Amino acid sequence: YCDSLLHVMVYGDVSNAAEIGELVRQPTTECGAIEGTMVLDVAQLLAAALQAIQAHKSGKMATNSLHSEIVYSLSGLKQINASFKTFGVRQTSQVVVLVSFDQANLMQVAAKVQGTAADPATLPASADTRALRAFYKIDDVELETGSMLDAIVNRIAAARL
């Protein structure tokens, strides 16, 4: 997987998030589905993907698949259920981010999304910064010396130290 690209697709106005969530939970689906309002930038996804790859290579994955490990790694927590509750796609998700190292599989899932494809560069506009600050416990003092994205990526990177 280290020689693979992480493919990312973003959708807005999604009307079938529950169906997409069920689809990515199938063991044969090599794709993760993420609540888009909890993603500030693609760099956040890349940090989580790197953590997932490292866990996979070391045989220390906490989840059953590399793609679910990405969703888990976004949280920086040890509680798998809490991670999926916060970052996994929800029935009510209107912004959905799909991630996969397998482009063909990603396209199969993407074909089933009932929503509008968006450029990943639009993620900051749909991010719930209040929820992100609360979840990652980012205070005003920290934002005086760095960005919110810096704080989030640092938490993801430090989670498994």
Image (cartoon, helix red, strand yellow):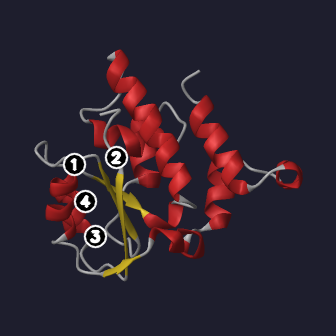
- The span from disc 3 to disc 2 (Cα, nearest Å) is 25 Å
Q: Secondary structure at mark 4?
A: helix
Residue 41, above or below 55: below
The residue under the point 22% across, 64% down is 20
- The span from disc 4 to disc 1 (Cα, nearest Å) is 18 Å
Residue type at mark 4 is Gly
The numbered dot on residue 17 is 3
Query: Which numbered disc, 4 or 1, marks the residue that appears first in the sequence?
Result: 4
Residue underneath mark 1 = 102
Mark 4 vs 3: CB contact within 8 A: yes
Residue 118, located in which quarter of the rendered image? bottom left
Residue 57, above or below 31: above
Q: Secondary structure at mark 2?
A: loop
The residue under the point 59% across, 69% down is 124
Residue farthest to the front, as pictured: 3
The image position of residue 108, as x and y in percent, is: 14, 63
- The span from disc 1 to disc 2 (Cα, nearest Å) is 8 Å
- The span from disc 1 to disc 3 (Cα, nearest Å) is 21 Å
The image position of residue 138, as x and y in percent, is: 74, 50
The image position of residue 110, as x and y in percent, is: 22, 68
Residue underneath mark 2 = 5
Q: Secondary structure at mark 1?
A: loop
Image side of residue 84 versus residue 159, left or right: left
Crowd around label 4: few <14 · some 14–19 · many ≥20 (10 Å): many
The residue under the point 37% across, 83% down is 13
Residue 69, located in which quarter of the rendered image? top left
Closer to us: mark 3 or mark 2?
A: 2
Closer to us: mark 4 or mark 1?
A: 1
Query: Which numbered disc, 4 or 2, marks the residue that appears first in the sequence?
Result: 2
Mark 4 vs 1: CB contact within 8 A: no
